[in-house]
Every structure is written in structure tokens, then in C-alpha cells.
Image (cartoon, helix red, strand yellow):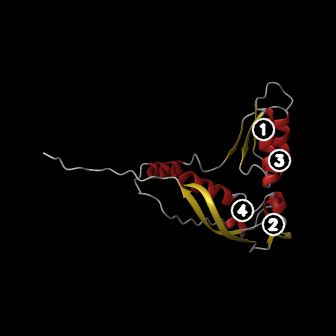
Amino acid sequence: MRSPEIDLVTVAVRIGLHHPIVLAALDAGKHVFCEWPLALNAIQATELSTRAQARGVAHAVGTQARFSPGIIYAKGLMESAYIGRPLFFHMTHFLASAIEPRPSHRRWSIRAEEGGGAILIACGHALDVVRWYLGEVAEVNGQVQTLVQETRFSDTGEVVPVDAIDTVACMVRLVLRFTINVLVLRANPQ
């Protein structure tokens, strides 16, 4: 971080380490590109955003799907009105990782205080795509749970408790940003 030859720091480590690394980079006057999610909570994220503004450096958070060819193609179809005006969407995102044994070095992924679970990672990436496609979130009504409450590590056989959220069910009302393009055909008066 102290090197004058470094202009940009990319942060791609487990979530619990994002905040201290991004903070150190910003304090060193470096531009930052951090993978999603930026931080463990809104307090940390606000601190980082405020610090970046105070230091006058650029900062961005990257999500996984924005450059996926299929997602870009679907975005183009929506923007061209190929599918009409979207009024409703339904999304199901199933991640088998919540029920499959995982190696012990992924212990952080079952601990809420370290950013593990569906709410910050998978749900955040999925909701980013929905927002990119359709518009900003206006209202959320939902429920979260931890259904798988213990897991066995595949490499050690150790059985450990899980407190990270593995199930998210929600209804989201969006501020739809699509407009209907109307082509008016008029009969020739002659």
C-alpha cells in the first residue's frame, strides 16, 4: 500500500477481510476495486464510501454476473423491448453448497459474523442482476432462515454448527425503469 508505483488495489479475499484491506488502501490514497460485497454491514460500507470521497479516490464494487454473456444478452433483449414491458419477475436461486459438505478452510462460509451465507453473497449477486435489468428496489418483504444448522467438513470429518443464513425468501417491489415505446400509425388523409 505504501508503494508510489501502485495506483489501484483489487480486493478479492474472504468477506471479513474486505473492510480492513479497503480501509488501508483508501488511507494510502489508492483507488479500490473490491469484489462483492464491499463489507459485512452498512456501517462498514458507509465508512469506506465516506473515506474514499474524503481521499478523492475512485472506488467500485464488482459483481459476478454483469459481464456474463447470457445476462448481457438478456439485458439487450429487455432494453430493445423484445419481451415487452416487464411487469413481474420470479427468480429461484438454489445453491447446493448449503447442504453439501465443504472443506474446513471454508469455515468462514458457515459463520454469519464473517459474511458467510446466502444473504450477502448469492442473494446480493442475484439482486444486482434484477436491479440492473429492471430498476431500483422500492420495497422488500421477506424472511431469512438457517435451515441447515450443522455441517460436516469433508476433509476432517468435524461436525460444526452453522449460523449463516442459507435461505432467503422475499418479495421485492421495484421502481420499473422501462417505458413503453408506442408507434402511432396514422392513415394517410389523402
Label 4, on which residue?
A: 119
SS assignment at label 3:
helix
- Residue 14 at what x, y percent from top left? 79, 51
- Mark 1–mark 4 distance (CA, rounded to whole Å): 25 Å
Tell me if label 3 and label 2 are in contact, CB under 8 Å: no
The amino acid type found where label 4 is placed reads Ile
- Residue 137 at what x, y percent from top left? 62, 58
**Which of pointers 1 and 4 indicates the residue nearer the eye?**
1
**Which of pointers 2 and 4 indicates the residue nearer the eye?**
4
Q: Is residue 175 left or right of 99 when viewed as pictured?
A: left
Q: Residue at x 60, y 51 (%)?
A: 65
The amino acid type found where label 3 is placed reads His
Q: Earlier in the sequence, mark 1 or mark 4?
A: 1
Work out whether 122 lies above or below 160.
Answer: above
- Mark 1–mark 2 distance (CA, rounded to whole Å): 39 Å
Q: Which mark is residue 19?
A: 3
The amino acid type found where label 1 is placed reads Ala
Q: Residues within 10 Å of mark 3 (few under 14, many from 20)?
A: many
Label 1, on which residue?
A: 52
Q: Earlier in the sequence, mark 3 or mark 2?
A: 3
Label 2, on which residue?
A: 153
- Mark 1–mark 3 distance (CA, rounded to whole Å): 12 Å
The amino acid type found where label 2 is placed reads Phe
Residue 105 visible in the displayed image: no
